[in-house]
């Protein structure tokens, strides 16, 4: 009987050791991201720019390679229309000489987090800001998966965009800057669309 008990304990210890090694050293996790508290935006006649401060956390042991990123608005009339990854910047606030790099593949080490100030771009009027809030979805193309992976779904409070032709930062919170901010945002967006000759 003692031999069986000893064998069971040995097998349990071996199983625990193998499982621990897999968990700590070889397990592939997933990428997690978090709702941004601010963003930068700009609208011109040619394109829309959206800059987001993204933190990507790898829950597993193996590095995860990020090949591409995009932002979609799944609740809109054209849910597959996206803002594509344009480049990566050194900070959120748009200033001269803040360019860091063109779009490039990067890796998130195991059980680590990286911060990226990612600038997304789309053709105008393909993705048109309407002076209201949007359901936004950040997706990634990862090295081990040919399909797009959902990273983060959050509310983009575009109601705060009061100067769309200037590339500046805005708060991404539900708190209004003033009681009439939604109406002002709507009027600003409608004026911009008329200026650029876009039906709305």
Image (cartoon, rainbow, N blue to C red):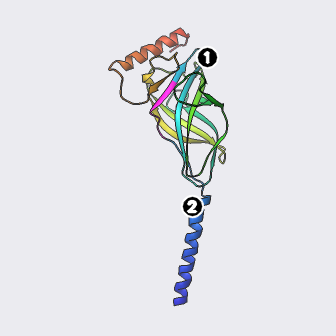
User: Dot 1: few (<14), some (14–19), or many (≥20) neighbours within 10 Å?
Assistant: few
Foreground disc of the pair 2, 1:
2
Residue at x-position 45% and y-position 25%: 170
- Vertical placement of residue 33 versus 19, above or below: above
Do we see residue 81 in this rendering?
Answer: no
C-alpha gap between disc 2 and disc 1: 48 Å
Label 2, secondary structure: give it: helix
Residue 23 marker: 2
- Which residue is under mark 1? 46
Label 1, secondary structure: give it: loop
The image position of residue 144, as x and y in percent, is 66, 48
Extreme residue in the left direction? 179
Which of the two residues, 102 or 138, is positioned nearer the viewer here? 102
Q: Quadrant of residue 116?
A: top right
Residue at x-position 58% and y-position 31%: 90
Q: Quadrant of residue 124?
A: top right
Q: Which residues are magenta?
A: 34-40
The image position of residue 172, as x and y in percent, is 43, 30
Extreme residue in the bottom direction? 1
Disc with the residue nearer the chain's start (2 vs 1): 2
Residue at x-position 34% and y-position 20%: 178
- Do the residues bearing badges 2 and 1 touch, measured as CB atoms within 8 Å? no
Which of the two residues, 174 or 166, is positioned nearer the viewer here? 166
The image position of residue 72, as x and y in percent, is 55, 32
């Amino acid at each position: 009987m003692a031999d069986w008990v000893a064998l069971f304990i040995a097998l349990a210890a071996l199983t625990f050791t193998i499982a621990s090694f897999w968990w700590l050293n070889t397990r592939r996790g997933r990428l997690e991201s978090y709702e941004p508290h601010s963003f930068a935006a700009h609208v011109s006649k040619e394109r829309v720019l959206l800059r987001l401060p993204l933190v990507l956390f790898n829950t597993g042991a193996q590095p995860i390679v990020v090949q591409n990123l995009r932002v979609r608005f799944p609740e809109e009339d054209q849910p597959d229309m996206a803002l594509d990854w344009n480049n990566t910047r050194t900070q959120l606030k748009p200033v001269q000489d803040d360019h860091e790099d063109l779009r490039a593949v990067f890796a998130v080490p195991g059980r680590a987090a990286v911060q990226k100030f990612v600038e997304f771009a789309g053709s105008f009027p393909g993705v048109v800001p309407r002076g209201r809030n949007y359901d936004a979805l950040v997706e990634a193309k990862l090295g081990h998966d040919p399909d797009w992976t959902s990273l983060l779904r959050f509310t983009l409070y575009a109601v705060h965009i009061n100067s769309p032709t200037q590339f500046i930062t805005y708060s991404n919170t539900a708190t209004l800057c003033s009681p009439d901010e939604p109406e002002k945002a709507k009027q600003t967006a409608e004026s911009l669309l008329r200026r650029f000759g876009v039906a709305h």
